[in-house]
Image (cartoon, rainbow, N blue to C red):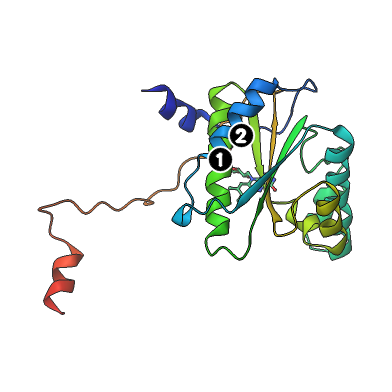
Amino acid sequence: MNETIRNILERRSIRAYRPEQIKDEERDIILQAAMHAPSAMGKQPWHFTVIQRKDIIDAISEGVKKAAINRNIPGLKERVLEPGFHALYAAPTAIIISGDKTSKFVYADCAAAAENILIAAQSLGIGTCFIAMTDIFFSTEEGRKFAREIGIPECYEPIYTVAVGYKACDAPQPAPRKENAVTILRQGDGSVFVAFQKNH
Ligand SMILES: Cc1cc2nc3c(=O)[nH]c(=O)nc-3n(C[C@H](O)[C@H](O)[C@H](O)COP(=O)(O)O)c2cc1C
């Protein structure tokens, strides 16, 4: 198996991080990978905000907690009130991926960039977790103001966050893969398409 496939198959969400910061060279390679993701019509409708300040990372988690309590969503409120809750798992680096929401496929584009971050980090032995929960905060008035204060440009809105750092735990076992998730129509097989052609 080649290294790329191994990194894809062995990547897992990491939810405990060592406090020391990743190296600047590692951070910059990860960002290069993010910026080389595919995007619809090559628009690159994204902006990456790299936060390597504990006070800001903790403030985002507190914002998520407050917003989740205010919104009173069953299950979520209990989760954020658990002792030790941290929306970004106290990772030393958080990369906020913001998108230009006037761009039609912005969610797919930003998710492609996020996946490149996860795989690039895995290839460097660095842990990550893809986090959408931060949206609970960033979709509030307070969260939008916070986004401007940390320098997210006017026409971009935070969409996803990726927690990044050296792992403080082993990778969890992957859940079993869903069955019947793949259909292959091979040349020469009797196929649905033949019936479709006859009827049209
Ligand atoms: C769109 C998206 C949103 C996610 N949001 C969160 C999140 O807010 N918090 C979290 O801990 N994990 C989050 N995850 C990670 C998933 O829980 C994780 O990928 C899934 O359980 C499979 O585990 P694995 O990544 O270890 O293979 C998210 C993943 C995706 C793709």
C-beta proximity under 8 Å, tags 1 and 2: yes
> Horizontal and vertical percent for residue 168?
72, 22
The residue carrying mark 2 is 31
Kindly indicate the quadrant of the structure image that contains residue 190: bottom left
Residue 181 vs residue 108: left or right? left
Work out whether 14 lies above or below 182: above
> Horizontal and vertical percent for residue 130?
64, 42
Residue 109 vs residue 144: left or right? left
SS at circle 1 = helix
Kindly indicate the quadrant of the structure image that contains residue 41: bottom left
Q: Residues within 10 Å of mark 1 (few under 14, many from 20)?
A: many
> Horizontal and vertical percent for residue 145?
86, 57
> Horizontal and vertical percent for residue 196?
18, 73
SS at circle 2 = helix
Is any atom of residue 12 visible in this view? no
Q: Residue at x 88, y 47 (%)?
A: 62
Q: Residue at x 14, y 72 (%)?
A: 197
Disc 1 residue lies near ligand 1 with CB under 8 A = no
The residue carrying mark 1 is 35
